[in-house]
């Protein structure tokens, strides 16, 4: 059994942590509520939809097809003999 002093310290720590967490959550809610109200006042009640960033493609479809073909040819040249050897052995 833990000593009485340790139990009191643990209880104080637990209650202090709970109180601090409660105060933090309360203040966060209050902050975001006031921010939302302020945004509604300045926007006239309607907020614009958030901007969605759509990145432009780096390569077009034809360029991608050419890169894929070049990659596949390189793999075939590099590993073609290995695949043929394994196929002969029944792998």
Image (tube, grey):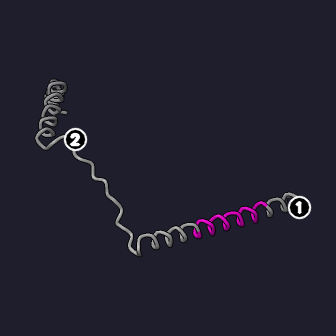
Left or right: residue 48 versus residue 69 is right
Could you say which quadrant of the image residue 48 lies in?
bottom left
Q: Is residue 74 above or below residue 13?
A: above
Residue 89 visible somewhere in the drawing: no
Q: Residue at x 13, y 38 (%)?
A: 63
Left or right: residue 87 versus residue 36 is left
Give the alpha-carbon distance from disc 2 to disc 1, as whole Å.
68 Å
Q: Residue at x 52, y 67 (%)?
A: 35
Q: Main secondary structure of the magenta part?
A: helix
Of the image marks 2 and 1, the number of the one nearer the N terminus: 1
Could you say which quadrant of the image residue 78 lies in?
top left
Write down the region rendered in magenta.
13-30
Give the percent coordinates (x, y) of residue 9.
83, 59
Residue extending furthest toward the bottom: 45
Q: Residue at x 88, y 59 (%)?
A: 5
Give the percent coordinates (x, y) of residue 54.
27, 52
Numbered circle sitting on residue 58:
2
**Image quadrant occupied by the N terminus:** bottom right
Residue 48 visible somewhere in the drawing: yes
Q: Is residue 18 above or below residue 71?
A: below
- Whether residue 8 is in magenta: the answer is no
In this figure, which residue is indicated by the disc labeled 1?
4
Q: Is residue 89 above or below residue 12?
A: above
């Amino acid at each position: 059994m833990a000593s009485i002093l340790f139990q009191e310290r643990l209880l104080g720590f637990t209650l202090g942590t709970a109180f601090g967490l409660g105060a933090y959550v309360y203040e966060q809610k209050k902050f975001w509520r006031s921010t939302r109200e302020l945004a509604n006042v300045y926007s006239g009640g309607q907020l614009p939809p958030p901007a969605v960033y759509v990145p432009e493609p780096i390569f077009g479809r034809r360029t991608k097809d050419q890169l894929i073909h070049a990659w596949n040819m390189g793999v075939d040249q590099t590993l073609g003999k290995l695949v043929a050897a394994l196929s002969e052995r029944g792998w």
